[in-house]
Amino acid sequence: MSVMSKSKEKDTTQYDVVVVGAGNAALCAAVSAAEQGARVLVLERAPMSERGGNSAYSGGAIRVAYRGIDDLRAIMPDLSEDEIATTDFGTYDEDQFFDDLATLSHYRMNQDLVSTFVERSRETMLWMREHGVRFVPIYGRQAYKVDGRFKFWGGLTVEAVGGGQGLVDSLFHAATKMGVEIMYGARAVRLLRKDLEVCGVEVIYNQRSQPIYAAAVILASGGFHANAEWRARYLGPNWDLAKPRASRFNTGDGIRMALDIGAMPYGHWSGCHSVAYERNAPEYGEPGILGLQKNSFPMGIMVNARGERFFDEGADFRNYIYANLGRAILAQPEGIAWQIFDQHTAGLLSDEYRVKQITKVQADTLEALVEKMGDVNRRGFLEYIRRYNESVRVEIPFNPNIKDGRGTIGLPVPKTNWANPLSKPPYLAFAVTCGITFTYGGLRINTDAQVLDEEQAPIPGLYATGELVGGLYYGGYAGGAGLMSGAVFGRIAGSNAARRDK
Ligand SMILES: Cc1cc2nc3c(=O)[nH]c(=O)nc-3n(C[C@H](O)[C@H](O)[C@H](O)COP(=O)(O)OP(=O)(O)OC[C@H]3O[C@@H](n4cnc5c(N)ncnc54)[C@H](O)[C@@H]3O)c2cc1C
């Protein structure tokens, strides 16, 4: 035990491990450190009522490598025989998982980090299960039923019971059961060092600053999506206008604290995950209202204020392209767009299209629809839809479960799959803008989750996991990777930080 830990039973200023943040990554780190016998303190900037960071807002979908039904059964022992009989779960092995992340990042990602989280994805989910997190198949969002049988697509098959909120509630339960202490309303503002070793953090709590010492500190305080000034500074012009979809507490504190002591900035600092998002959404995300995002766009089309399409809605399954859509919308006039569907696909829209808080118009003719939309050029829209309808390769059968190749011909912006002429009223239109989910740039860690300095040497006593780790995503992102990487590196950070104390 370190000198610091001698009187640790009573002292609330000294711990073996301090974790900054209380989302999925932080809680996995805390549970893992506690498993090693460490005395652990979690600092949560949010009050208890808003705890859990972006993780609590998330859909709880987790991308995991699996070779078939036996692997899935181990993760989801509650799978029924009936579900297995009526579902094609397919396979998603480590190579596919790695290739998806490599392709989406245009091969820029850190291969060692990505290999680690892909290879350890399955064992980490089994470990989470041991700690009380339960998982089920994502029938609602990742599978369509065709001819009486569900088929999963896009490599994303599993979600936590209760979504992101269920996930963090289970992890909070596991952590407190193992004796992890949690301090709410406690904002870490500075890393403390003795010589060059990190030995604690300065915390603002009850409007007072206080030091808390530890043999190791794990940063898991998320990215900077909720910091308008950093968004404009790093993501570029107009990103201050993007709507944060989730926690108002992720303002980049952990990244800043580490950079202040010489950590290396790493990853895609001008990149972020951003989606099509309800245009009249509140200033920050609202927990439990995942439906403000609008992800069924492959089943329809999107137009800007000129009435023209600007994005290939059918380029791939939605969870390979949705994370770049917010950026594309922000680049349109006024940063807005409309998603449009007719009765060919209205029945395939996800629940996100049925929540109360959305801006939706409906009409029996396209002329009436564009009138109701209000801010779209009428002539431009009607002329564009005429050209679009003529361009659809209707001779190819429509099938939402596969990349059906039913695309368009001759348009400046093609639609590659799932195209249908807009001809079956009533027509539906949904107003969207750019919603920012999380940022890609951050700190550099090694596969032991140690934070590296600008010489690429580990900073003694400092670990990191989750959204503030750079080098995993560049340009694109595969849905479900965020929670998985945070869990894998959280588990690694926790056990390494705890061992450091010993
Ligand atoms: C609406 C939405 C849906 C999503 N759906 C999915 C999904 O289905 N699957 C998936 O894999 N990913 C999803 N994501 C992305 C996913 O939520 C993130 O990748 C992941 O939750 C990040 O986890 P984290 O623990 O690193 O950060 P967070 O969960 O954001 O936790 C950060 C924590 O740090 C705290 N904090 C911040 N600053 C300080 C400070 N100075 N001191 C102390 N505490 C601080 C915050 O309060 C918070 O508790 C979604 C995101 C959103 C917004």
Image (tube, rainbow, N blue to C red):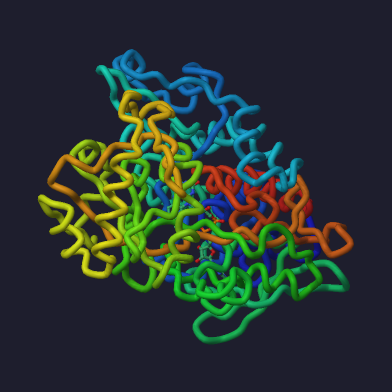
- Camera-nearest residue between 260 and 154: 154
So how many labels did they put on this image?
A: 0
Any part of residue 56 in sight: no
Rendering quarter of residue 12: bottom right
Q: Residue furthest left?
A: 364
Residue found 52% across the figure and 86% down from its top: 207
- Camera-nearest residue between 408 and 111: 408
- Camera-nearest residue between 279 and 225: 279
- Camera-nearest residue between 2 and 253: 253
5 vs 485, left or right, is: right
Against 358, is 333 above or below? below
Against 206, is 433 above or below? above
Residue found 21% across the figure and 50% down from its top: 354
Any part of residue 438 in sight: yes
Rendering quarter of residue 281: bottom left
Residue found 87% across the figure and 58% down from its top: 457
Against 362, is 122 above or below? above
478 vs 120, left or right, is: left
313 vs 385, left or right, is: right
Residue found 36% across the figure and 34% down from its top: 418
Residue 169 at x, y = what percent?
41, 51
184 vs 346, left or right, is: right
Residue 170 at x, y = what percent?
43, 46
Rendering quarter of residue 76: top left
Residue 257 at x, y = what percent?
69, 73
Residue 159 at x, y = what percent?
42, 38
Q: Quadrant of the N terminus?
A: bottom right
Against 77, is 266 above or below? below
